[in-house]
């Protein structure tokens, strides 16, 4: 099995919307960035094929909105339902103070391919498909990069900064390999919405992991801060 190595300024683990967009923003700012995605393409089922109003606002701020909306999509401005023969309104986005007060229904692979095409215009952007992060590389007590599995064998990618943007937190190789200890905080539940939080601590860092469920959609975030 071949073993190889390379180096970048920032290594982003996970080629979802968060990882690709981070790679785009860093590359546009002149920062060398390598984004690792374990699949060979984006043509698969995703948990969400929606682009929400504040994401659309961000696309506008980045100068990408006009071209993004050329991709075939549907606009959802309000959500209504029926219960016991009575109609009711679940959500109305038309009052949002944003450029796009609606949710754009768009296949996520189209959104990701769009972001990748724009990011590749910058030489600092390097997207590596079929590169699965399996561990963090340590040297002298510090994280120095990522160990990955590729179709050609194993590889180590050195980096000044490693960012975990993997979609499913319980399978997150970066968090697992970071050896954080985690303590759960009480979760709350209201109808189809539930939320919980966990604190993750190490000798040098602490983090808060937040998960929330809205109907069938899960949202997760991890924020790292110096201890």
Image (cartoon, rainbow, N blue to C red):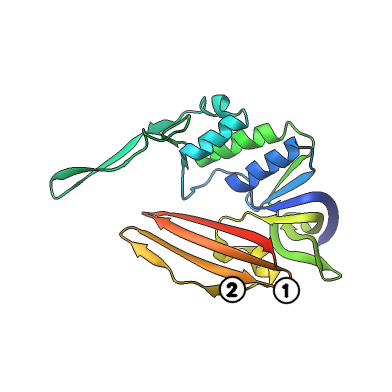
Give the percent coordinates (x, y) of residue 65. 55, 28
- Residue toward you, 193 or 176: 193
| Residue 220, numbered label | none
- Residue toward you, 226 or 58: 226
Q: Quadrant of residue 60?
A: top right
Q: Could you say whether the residue bearing mark 2 is in a helix, strand or loop?
A: strand
Q: Which residue is mark 2?
A: 182
Q: Which residue is mark 1?
A: 203
User: Of callouts 1 and 2, which one flags the residue occurring earlier in the amino acid sequence?
Assistant: 2
- Badge 2 crowding class, 10 Å Cα cut-off, few under 14, some 14 to 19, many 20 or more, is some
- Badge 1 crowding class, 10 Å Cα cut-off, few under 14, some 14 to 19, many 20 or more, is few
Residue 37 vertical placement versus 110 (above, below) = below
Picture residue at 56% right of the left edge, 63% below the top: 209
Quadrant assignment for the N terminus: bottom right
Give the percent coordinates (x, y) of residue 105. 43, 36
Q: Are marks 1 and 2 in contact (CB under 8 Å)?
A: no
Residue 20 vertical placement versus 205 (above, below) = above
């Amino acid at each position: 099995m071949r073993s190889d190595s390379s180096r970048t300024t920032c290594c982003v683990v996970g080629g979802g919307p968060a990882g690709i967009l981070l790679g785009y923003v860093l590359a546009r700012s002149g920062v060398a960035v390598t984004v690792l995605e374990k699949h060979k393409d984006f043509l698969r089922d995703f948990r969400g094929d929606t682009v929400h109003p504040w994401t659309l606002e961000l696309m506008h701020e980045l100068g990408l909105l006009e071209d993004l909306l050329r991709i075939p999509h549907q606009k959802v401005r309000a959500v209504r339902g029926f219960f016991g023969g009575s109609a009711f309104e679940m959500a109305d986005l038309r009052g949002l103070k944003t450029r796009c007060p609606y949710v754009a229904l768009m296949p996520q692979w189209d959104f990701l391919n769009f972001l990748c095409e724009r990011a590749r215009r910058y030489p600092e952007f390097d997207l590596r498909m079929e590169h699965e992060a399996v561990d963090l590389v340590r040297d002298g007590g510090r994280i120095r990069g990522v160990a990955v599995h590729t179709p050609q064998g194993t590889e180590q990618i050195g980096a000044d900064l490693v960012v975990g943007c993997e979609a499913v937190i319980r399978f997150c190789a970066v968090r697992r390999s970071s050896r954080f200890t985690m303590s759960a905080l009480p979760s709350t539940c209201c109808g189809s919405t539930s939320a919980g939080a966990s604190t993750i601590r190490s000798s040098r860092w602490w983090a808060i992991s937040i998960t929330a469920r809205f109907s069938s959609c899960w949202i997760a975030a991890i924020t790292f801060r110096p201890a």
